Image (cartoon, grey):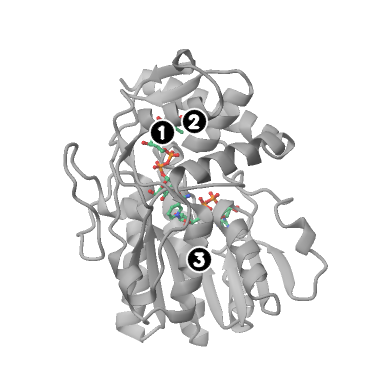
Amino acid sequence: MKLLITGGLGFIGTNFIRHWFSVHPSDSIINLDKITYAANPKNLIEFEGKNNYRFVKGDILDTDLVDPLVSQVDVIVHFAAESHVDRSIDDPLLFVRTNVLGTYTLLNAAHKYQKRFHHVSTDEVFGSIPFDSDEQFNELTPYDPSSPYSASKAASDHFVRSFHKTFGLPITISNCSNNYGPYQHPEKMIPRTITNLLAGEKIKVYGQGDNFRDWLHVKDHCRAIETIILHGKIGETYCIGGLKKGTANIDLVKNILSLMGKDESFIEYVPDRPAHDNYAVNWNKIHQELGWEPQYTLDTGLRQTIDWYQKHQDWYQDSKKEAEIFYQKLADYKNIHK
Ligand code: NAD
Ligand code: DAU
């Protein structure tokens, strides 16, 4: 199979390309990535020069670049996005540009050449689960996004589905919960917490830390996407989530503190994120129809992730500096607007 991966130098794209080559070593991959602040060009350096891997630096909105790439492959797996909720508060238009217009540009190319299109989306499109509820999002949950990020992903999902209904484009969509694992940018909660502790700094907990998430190891997400590409039913959406539902941020943080041998004096409560959601995902459909289930417990995954960041401090130093400058700017913005 020949695949076009968009955003393959980001967190999940990098893990996905590594996973795909480990299971399908004779397949070919073109990796199209703009190399935004979120990418690390060194992530896949060992594949460069191999005859079945090609990196193309470019923008998914560039039709002249995208069309010939799409024409050469069997399937497009679309990861490229602006992915950070906090940055979408700072610059919503960038999220409309990349996540909505970028997806639309790729869909047009896929339609032109009638190629299979898998869209990697998020559980955030469904909005928020109330506190003290054991509700879970599923494929029938109505869309109700809260942030400019989730609104842009929701819009992109609608465009993907509309290209199937209107033009018969062979699509699938996955809506996944929070990923963690190696190669995640240190702006995100788990790597930010681990890297702060490695530097002997306090960790930042938004609000009271009672918002909850459904954590999934990135390798489990990559296996789920692979399963959908190989066996998923065209036109369908699949929800993907982890083994443990409703982990409150404060419990997650205490778990990481204990695994890293630190006490709770390292916790610093900071002003909350506006429109702060809660998530939990029911993944019965992909389990029952395609046989997928997560393999990592949160405990095993966190141990492996802490170990990875401990061993890869060079990998994140520059991006961590940039992320903390961004957070300072966001804190100033919150002070002005409170
Ligand atoms: P990321 O921010 O780590 O990586 C995004 C990648 O896309 C980067 O390499 C970046 O350079 C590239 N990119 C951005 N704009 C581009 C453009 N205009 N043209 C080409 N490339 C561009 O994101 P991630 O966490 O790996 O997420 C990947 C996808 O998975 C996103 O679509 C996101 O919405 C979705 N998702 C993420 C999670 C999660 O927990 N991280 C969960 C569910 C779904
Ligand atoms: O649910 C899937 C989504 O998960 C993806 O679609 C997004 O691309 C991905 O970034 C992630 O979004 P979140 O907003 O859930 O991730 P983040 O790591 O930013 O925050 C996780 C939780 O931790 C959230 O409740 C906010 C909180 N938080 C975050 C940071 C960075 C803190 O309390 N302190 C922090 O320093």
Q: Assign the C terminus to one quadrant of the image.
A: top left
Asked whether disc 1 touches disc 2, contact meaning CB atoms under 8 Å apart, the reply is yes
Residue at 57%, 45% (x, y): give it: 184
Asked whether disc 3 touches disc 2, contact meaning CB atoms under 8 Å apart, the reply is no
Label 1 SS: helix
130 or 257: nearer the eye? 257
Q: Is mark 3 within 8 Å of ligand 1?
A: no
Q: 204 above or below 37?
A: above
Q: 314 above or below 295?
A: above
Asked whether disc 3 touches disc 1, contact meaning CB atoms under 8 Å apart, the reply is no
Percent coordinates x, y for residue 40 in the rendering: 67, 48
Task: Report which residue position mark 2 lands on.
Answer: 256
Q: Residue furthest right?
A: 49
Q: CA distance from mark 1 to mark 2?
A: 6 Å
Horizontal relation, residue 271 to residue 193: left or right:
left
Mark 3 or 1, nearer chain start? 3
Q: Is residue 123 visible?
A: yes
Mark 3 or 2, nearer chain start? 3
Task: Report which residue position mark 3 lands on.
Answer: 223
Q: Assign the N terminus to one quadrant of the image.
A: bottom right
Q: Residue furthest top?
A: 265
Q: Is mark 1 within 8 Å of ligand 2?
A: yes
24 or 298: nearer the eye? 298
**Amino acid type at image mark 3:** Arg
Q: CA distance from mark 3 to mark 1?
A: 24 Å
Label 2 SS: helix
Mark 3 closeness class: few <14, some 14–19, many ≥20 residues within 10 Å = some
Percent coordinates x, y for residue 289 in the rendering: 33, 76
Query: Which label is found at residue 252?
Result: 1
Image quadrant of residue 92? top left
Q: Is residue 7 visible?
A: no
Q: 256 above or below 95?
A: above
